[in-house]
């Protein structure tokens, strides 16, 4: 098994491409060992000293580190990912839910929200996945779109610029009622 690695815009996060599906649908993020315990692979990665975050996309794993050096972490991470996929264990239990059921908006804004979600799903998320992260819709109120940044996007130095200059401008262009985009 050959696992490729790619840098991300966040210097504390590295993207690992195992050459196979990681999650068939949805994403998974663990920011501590307790959240990681829901996934055998995430739990193994959190056992590596210096790992502070794990994110699974459709065909990649991103790992976030503390002050440790990638030269020391990368071999252990590659070994844990390879060992996991060779073992045949699932990445997540089958009962893992992919839906974001706690998103909020007023019923009168349902049409706007559908358009916003479609733009995020078709134009924003694929580009963000290339950088090892994800952005999901969390809510809409009074012209403000609330988005959750995950994986390499969470804590990335350029995330504010991405939100304000990229996503906000895109949404304002297609949905004039949008006045601002905020992270949650």
Image (spheres, rainbow, N blue to C red):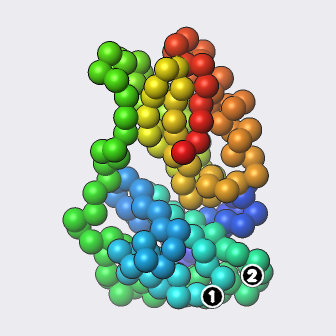
Disc 2 and disc 1: Cα gap in Å? Answer: 8 Å
What secondary structure is found at the residue carrying circle 1? loop
* Residue name at image x 72 percent, y 30 percent: 165
At label 1, counting other C-alpha atoms closer than 10 Å, the crowd grade (few under 14, some 14-19, many 20 or more) is few
In depth, the one of 46 and 81 nearer the eye is 46
Residue 152 at what x, y percent from top left?
A: 62, 58
97 on left or right of 146:
left
Q: Are marks 2 and 1 in contact (CB under 8 Å)?
A: yes
In depth, the one of 106 and 61 nearer the eye is 106
At label 2, counting other C-alpha atoms closer than 10 Å, the crowd grade (few under 14, some 14-19, many 20 or more) is few
Determine if residue 69 is in view.
yes
The answer to whether 161 is drawn above or below residue 113 in the figure is below
Residue 117 at what x, y percent from top left?
A: 42, 30
Disc on res. 167: none
The answer to whether 173 is drawn above or below residue 83 in the figure is above
N-term-proximal mark, 2 vs 1:
1
Q: Residue furthest left?
A: 95
Residue 86 at what x, y percent from top left?
A: 40, 85
Determine if residue 129 is in view.
no
Q: Kindly indicate the quadrant of the structure image that contains residue 144.
A: top right
107 on left or right of 157:
left
Quadrant of the drawing holding the C terminus: top right
Residue 129 at what x, y percent from top left?
A: 55, 50
Q: Residue furthest top?
A: 176
* Residue name at image x 59 percent, y 36 percent: 182
The answer to whether 175 is drawn above or below residue 154 in the figure is above
In depth, the one of 3 and 167 nearer the eye is 167
Q: Which residue is mark 2?
A: 68
* Residue name at image x 32 percent, y 15 percent: 108
Q: Which residue is mark 1?
A: 49
82 on left or right of 74:
left
């Amino acid at each position: 098994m050959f696992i490729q690695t790619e840098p991300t815009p966040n210097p504390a996060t590295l993207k690992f491409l195992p050459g196979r599906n990681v999650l068939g649908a949805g994403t998974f993020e663990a920011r501590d060992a307790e959240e990681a315990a829901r996934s055998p692979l995430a739990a193994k990665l959190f056992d590596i000293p210096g790992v502070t975050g794990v994110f699974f996309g459709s065909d990649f794993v991103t790992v976030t580190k503390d002050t440790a050096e990638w030269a020391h972490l990368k071999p252990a991470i590659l070994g844990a990912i390879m060992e996991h996929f060779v073992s045949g264990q699932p990445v997540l239990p089958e009962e893992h839910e992919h839906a974001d059921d706690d998103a909020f908006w007023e019923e009168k804004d349902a049409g706007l929200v559908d358009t916003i979600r479609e733009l995020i799903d078709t134009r924003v998320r694929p580009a963000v996945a290339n950088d090892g992260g994800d952005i999901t819709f969390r809510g809409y109120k009074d012209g403000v779109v609330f988005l959750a940044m995950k994986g390499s996007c969470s804590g990335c130095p350029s995330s504010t610029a991405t939100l304000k200059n990229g996503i906000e401008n895109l949404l304002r262009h297609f949905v004039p009622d949008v006045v601002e985009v905020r992270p949650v």
